[in-house]
Amino acid sequence: MNQHYYPVVRAKGGEFDAFKHMPSSVTNRCTPILEIPKISQKEYETAAKHSGMPYEYWMDNKAKNIAAIFKGGSLIVDASQWQVDFTTESGHHVLGYMSSLLASLGVLVHPVVGYARWDSPEYRQSIRDMSLQPNANFVIRLDEIALEDMAEFDHFESILDDICTSIDIERSDTKVIIDIGDVTKLPILEITETITESYFSLVGIGFNEIVVTASSIPDSIEKAVKDRDSSDTVVRKEMLAWKGFVSANPKANLSFGDYGVRNPRSSDIIAPDMNVKIRYTIENGFFIVRGHSVRGPNGYAQSQSLSRVIVDSKHYLGSNFSWGDARILTCSQGLMVGNSTSWIAIDTNHHVTAVTTEIFEFATTVAAQISNSNITF
């Protein structure tokens, strides 16, 4: 098994702050799959005031913000949220433009090739035109469409073969992401079956480095915690399914990934009536504390009482566990409040630290079991 962690994160302020405050002991054990979000109308209007090429102006600044955190490190970068045929003012595809910018700023970029986008001639050409840095590699991302195509395996393999041939990559050297996405409504057994079938199908045609990503955190707080001003736990099905697969196949080279504390389909738009909440990652789950609307009593200040619920719970790992945990304690003491962006940072920082630890501990247990099974008397 591979102990490296691949969190899917958005190139947004909260995630930047989360990684800014992570020690190398954590960042060395994970490689973010960084999704470049679409520019908002407000961001476009602001960029247009500063430049006649607002898209590229926005991307230039976004790249600088990314490099400020990840310079000297490596990222898997995807631009799948943008229209497949979108180009900047100078005619560049978003993925190629951002990858080039980040490379020039000292980030090792592994660009994502989207299986579902490969049927676009413009997209294929943009991928072919990209020049990779030394030690950089393309990464193939399989989404729901690809997983459905596996039922017609000859067709599925032909597309993968066309991708590899067109951009001159070897299957054995190419990482593949099995992106199952939102699994909130799927039973763990079905997720495990999808992982198993996909993994062995890919291994069977020569791919050796495989990552599975999924998310079981709901896209709205009401689906996670039914009542306002209360708490509940949510099972991280993706983690249990991965552990189940690895336990059954301990020598499989399958790495774990997830979507952090966000649902893949959640919006970046902050609703005026959003509930204040803390998503605290625990072993195989989330402990979620829900407040009420920010327009209700105490507004964001209710995060202080929510933090006290976390700190007083059996789940809290202490202020020394991560920067996020330290911030939760500070908030519980009435010394900070925060907003939606800062709580994304706090929750994500704790989550990534907790998951890298969980993966390591699980791998240690599996290794010990393998060692014990090989003992002869």
Image (cartoon, rainbow, N blue to C red):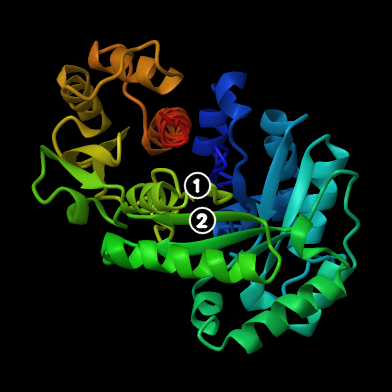
Residue 90 left/right relative to 371: right
The earlier-in-sequence mark between 2 and 1 is 2
Residue 112 left/right relative to 353: right
Q: Nearer the viewer, residue 45 or 25?
A: 25
Q: Can residue 82 be seen from the camera position used here?
A: no
The answer to the question of whether label 2 and label 1 lie on touching residues, with beta carbons closer than 8 A, is: yes
What amino acid is at disc 2?
Val
Label 1 Cα neighbours within 10 Å, binned few <14 / some 14-19 / many ≥20: many
Q: Residue at x 72, y 72 (%)?
A: 86
Which quadrant does the N terminus fall into?
top right
CA separation, marks 2 and 1? 6 Å
Residue on which disc 1 sits: 256
Residue 65 left/right relative to 350: right
* Picture layout, residue 106 above or below residue 257: above
Q: Residue at x 38, y 33 (%)?
A: 347
Label 2 Cα neighbours within 10 Å, binned few <14 / some 14-19 / many ≥20: many
**Where does residue 235 sit, x and y in percent of width and height?**
25, 48
Quadrant position of residue 320: top left
Q: Can residue 331 be seen from the camera position used here?
A: yes
Which quadrant does the C terminus fall into?
top left
On residue 376, the disc is none
Residue on which disc 2 sits: 212
Q: Residue at x 40, y 52 (%)?
A: 248
What amino acid is at disc 1?
Phe
* Picture layout, residue 166 above or below residue 184: below
Q: Residue at x 16, y 18 (%)?
A: 312
As helix, strand or loop, the secondary structure at mark 1 comes to strand
